[in-house]
Image (spheres, rainbow, N blue to C red):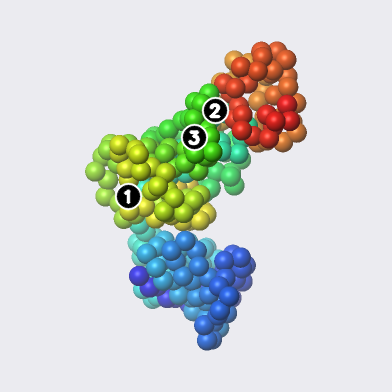
Amino acid sequence: MTIVFKVSDNLKDKIIDYYKDLRKEKTPPYAVFQAMEADTTITLYESGKIMFQGVSADIDANIWIDLEKKLNNRIINLDGTETKEKALNKDIVALSTIGSDEVGTGDFFGPIVVTATFVSNNDFEFLQNLRVKDSKKISDEKINQIAPEIMKRIPYVTTILDNKTYNEHYSQKNNMNKLKAILHNKALFELKEKNNFSYAKIIVDEFCSKENFYKYIEDMPNKVYHITFMTKAEDKVLSVACASIISRYTFLRKMDELSEQLQIVLPKGAGENVDKVAKEIVEEYGIDKLKEIAKMNFSNANRL
């Protein structure tokens, strides 16, 4: 698939900055740059035209089309033509997708949570009104407000790996990426089993290569194939953004439950404040309790 349209000067600078770390060494004639993101090749020409080529060209292009609309009140369709603002929502090509994302992999305390969601193009206006985006760019307070609304409307499946189970299965063979791949596959499969959703693509935020992902899940009885792996997918695809938000919301609820059980507020992340609380937990409850609620392969455990 190939999509070409002309960008304004306002958007041109943002595009140049966004793709600065993804540029190819060689630049085609009359081009400002050529970059590669996941399976999409992006070429920005001196004329101001930008070309997206690849399986996910429509998804990548749609992100910039939407931003162009917001910056300049212009509508650029995926065929490169322009439409007046009155046709705002009807003339933007939007894809219905299934997407998945995870949280908790960088936190010493708390589980790993993976969610898969189905978002149809009929849900776009609802989600845009909620200002849905990557959960890492939304405050926890805002997550607690909008996640229940999303969960009422958007079909989803959430899988949770508690830290006791994580510690039992983590090894050099079963590394973090393998465990994540298994959880993503499980959530995606169970969501697809819930309903015969009419979707254009399955999108997973890329945390490993496609080849490794399928290798990680090769022993699973139920597998999902034909996945599009995309970097920063939670910033580009609403189904992945919703999955990110629901996962974060679930993670926060689990952290609150653990904090209440221990009567100790568990901090997020893996910094020095986490070390202090880990020491407090061991002194109060013993090392076995820590193994139930923390990821023991983290350097926090070694320091303790």
| The quarter of the displayed image where residue 86 is located | bottom left
Q: Nearer the viewer, residue 208 or 259?
A: 208
Residue on which the image places disc 2: 167
In the image, is 18 to the left or to the right of 38? Answer: right
Local crowd size for mark 1, using a 10 Å CA cut-off: few (<14), some (14–19), many (≥20): few
Mark 3 crowdedness (10 Å alpha carbons): few <14, some 14-19, many ≥20: many
Residue 155: tell me if it is visible: no
Amino acid at dot 2: Asn
- What SS does tag 3 mark? strand
**Residue 209, numbered label:** none
Rendered residue at 38%/42% (across/down)? 217
Q: Secondary structure at mark 1?
A: loop
Look at label 1 and name its amino acid: Tyr
**Image x and y of residue 79, in percent:** 36, 73
Residue depicted at 58% across the width and 45% down the height: 136
Residue 118 rendering spot, x and y as whole percentages: 36, 45
Mark 2 or mark 3, whichever is nearer to me = 2
Whether 137 is drawn above or below 58: the answer is above
Determine which of the numbered discs, if any, sits on residue 113 in the image: 3
Q: Earlier in the sequence, mark 1 or mark 3?
A: 3
Q: Secondary structure at mark 2?
A: helix
- The one nearer the camera, 8 or 195, is 195
The vertical placement of 75 against 131, above or below, is below
How far across and how far down the image is residue 301, in percent?
68, 29
Earlier sequence position, callout 2 versus callout 3: 3
Q: Quadrant of the C terminus?
A: top right
Task: Say which residue appears at 51% left-offset and 49% top-offset.
Answer: 207
Query: Which marked residue is nearer to the observer: mark 1 or mark 3?
Result: 1
Mark 2 vs mark 3, CA separation in Å: 15 Å
Checking the image for residue 225, the label placed there is 1
